[in-house]
Amino acid sequence: MQRKLWMVLALLVLVPGLMLMTSCAQQTAVEQDTTQKTTPSADTSGTTGGEDLPDDAAKRAAEQAMNQFINEHIYFSFDSAQLSAMAQDTLKRKAAWLQENAGVMVAIEGHCDERGTNEYNLALGERRAQSARAYLVDLGISASRLSTISYGEERPLDARSTEEAWAKNRRGQFKLK
Amino acid sequence: MSHVTRRFGLLPILVMLLLLLVAAPSQAVEEFIEINPFLKKIPLAIPEFKPLTEDAPSVQAATEAVQLLEETLLFTGYFKVIDKGAYLENPRETGITDASINYRNWTVIGTELLITGGVRRSAEAVEMELRLFDTFKGQSVLGKRYRGTPKDTRRIVRKFASEVVFLLTGSRGFFNSEIAFVSTGTGNKEIYISEFDGRNPAQFTRTRNITLSPAWSPDGQWLAYTAYPKNRPFLYIKHRRHKRGYEIGNKGLNITPAWVPTDDSSAALEEMRLAATLSFTGDQEIYLLTGKGKIIKRLTKSWGSDVSPTWSPDGKKLAFVSNRSGNPHIYVKDLASGRVDRLTFQGRYNTQPNWSPKGDKLAYAGMEGGRNDIFVIGFKGRPPVQLTRNSGNNESPSWSPDGSMIAFSSTREGRARIFVMTAFGTDQRRLLKLPGEQTNPQWSPNKHLN
C-alpha cells in the first residue's frame, strides 16, 4: 500500500516533468532553426539540442519547482482528514516553495473517493482542505494566501472503482490563483 | 367506505384498526407486528374500456386510457392485474354499469376489484365514465364521469386512480407528483425533473458545472440545490416554472438544503424556511434560513461535519448526519428541548437520512463493505430493516409524498439509475434511463388534483 502510493507520487512528479522537458526541447529547436537561416555558417558547435543559457536553466528549475508544487498531491485515508507523515512531508515542501514565491495565492482543493455519499463527501473534502491549510499556516504561510474549496467526490482523478483509484482520489490538490 | 374496508380485509386501514384493537393494552405487541400491504396484492380486473361512440378517436382513446390506468395502479404496488385471457365477460360488449355486470363471472377467476370504463373523444373534448366494483360484495363502490380537453386524458386517469387509492388506503397517493434528480447526460451534473413514473424527463438547471442535492419546497413551487458558479458550492433557490430565484454564497460550503414542512400550501417564499449546512465559521453546522436564504439561527453545535438535514413532518424534529462520534451517523434533534439523540448504531457509515412523510420512520443509506444499501429505521430502538442487498450501490432514498414508496439510485445495472420500490422494499424497478448517470432523486409533494 505504502509502496503503491510512493509509485503513484513518483509518477505524478515524473510525468509532468518529462512533459515539460519535451516542450522545452521543442522550443529550443525552433529557435535554432531561425538562427540557421540568418547565419547558416555560425553553426559550428555540433550539438543539435542547443545549450542552455544560465538564465534558461534558472527559469527551468523554477518552472519545475512550480510544477512539482501543482502536481504533487497529498493523500488521505478513507473518511479521514488527518495528515499522514507523508502528507506532512509534502506540505513542508509546499511551504518552502510558498516562502520562496511570496506573491502566490493558492486554492487548496479537498477531494474524496466515490464510496461515500455525495453530501457527506462535500463536508469531508472541505475538512481535508482545511487540515492542509492549517498545517501550512502553522509552518508560517499567511492564511490570507490560502483558500479552501471542496469538490467532494465530484472530480476524481481516476474514474475506476478500484482500491488504487480510490487512494488516488482521496486527495488534497493545490491550484495557483 | 365501511363496506369497502370490511370486504378488503387485508387492506392497510383495517389492519391498522385491528392492530390497535388487539394490541392496545400492550405497547410491545403493537411495535412487534408490522404488516406489509405489498405482500398480498389485491387482484384487480381491468377489462377493455368501451368506446361510448364507435368512431376511431374514441376507440383509440379507450385503448390508451385502459392501458394508462392499469400502469398507474400497478405502479403503487398494491395491485396485481388478473390475466386478461381469463376474463369470462367483456363489459365492452355487455355493458359497463352495475346492472349489466355478472359478479360471479369475476369472483370465480379471483377478482376482488373490477374497474370498467367508457370513453368518448372528439377533436374538442374527451369524456370518461369510470367505475370501481367490489365483486365479492357485488356492488359499485365508486363511479365518476369526467370531461376535459383531449389533452386531459392522463390527468383524468390519474385522478380516478387517486380516488381508488384513497378509498383503499385513506391517502391521496402521489399521482400528481414529480421526481427531481441529478443526471450527467450533458457531461456535467445537472438537475432534471420527471413525472412520478419517470415520464417526460426535462432538464431543469443549466449550470454547466456540478449541480447537486435538489430539494422541493413544501408547495412544490421551488427547488433548492447546490451548484458551483465560480467553482464554489453555493445554494440556489429557484422557482419551478419561472426560474427566478435567490443565491446563497457564504464563504465555505453552502450545501444540503431541506425545507421545513408546512401544511399551508399557499405560503409565500418569505414564510417558508429551510435548513442547510454552511461552513463560513470554519466549522460545518446546520442553520435555519428564510426561503430567500437569510440566516435565522444555527441549529447544530458540534465540531466536525453536521450535514444532510431532514425534517419530521411536524417540523419539530430534525435528523442529520454528524461525524461527532468519529464516523458518520444519523442523529435526531428535538428543537423544543434542544436534546440530540444518536439514531443509528449499526455499521460505521450511515448517511442521507430522509424522514418518512408519515413520521414514523426514516430511510437512509448505510455502507457495508464499501457499498451503500437502503435501510429504514423507526424511533423506538428496534434495529434497522435493510431494503436493498446484493444489487450494486444503492443511495439517496427519498419517500413518496404519501410514504408508500421510496425512490433511490442504484448501480445494479452498471451505471447509476433512478429506481423505486415500495416502503417495504418490494417491487424494486428502474424508473428511467437517460444518457449518462442518474442519481440523487427527490420526490416532490403531491399537488392537489383539480
Image (spheres, coloured by chain):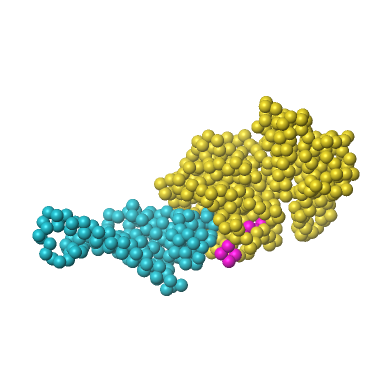
> B164 or B281: which is nearer to us?
B164
Q: Residue at x 83, y 40 (%)?
A: B90
Question: Image quadrant for the N terminus of chain B?
Answer: top right
Q: Does the stretch in magenta take in B372?
A: yes
In this image, A159 relative to B438: left or right?
Answer: left
In the figure, the shade used to draw chain A is: cyan
Chain coloured yellow here: B
Q: Please identify the residue farthest to the top as the structure is shown.
A: B124
> B294 or B150: which is nearer to us?
B150
**Residue B183 percent coordinates (x, y):** 53, 49
Q: Kindly report the secondary structure that dominates the magenta region of the rendered protein.
A: strand
**Residue B377 percent coordinates (x, y):** 67, 57
Question: Image quadrant for the C terminus of chain B?
Answer: top right
**Residue B210 percent coordinates (x, y):** 47, 49
**Residue A77 percent coordinates (x, y):** 47, 66
Magenta segment boundaries in residue numbering: B368-376
Q: Residue at x 63, y 52 (%)?
A: B430
Q: Does the stretch in magenta take in B41?
A: no
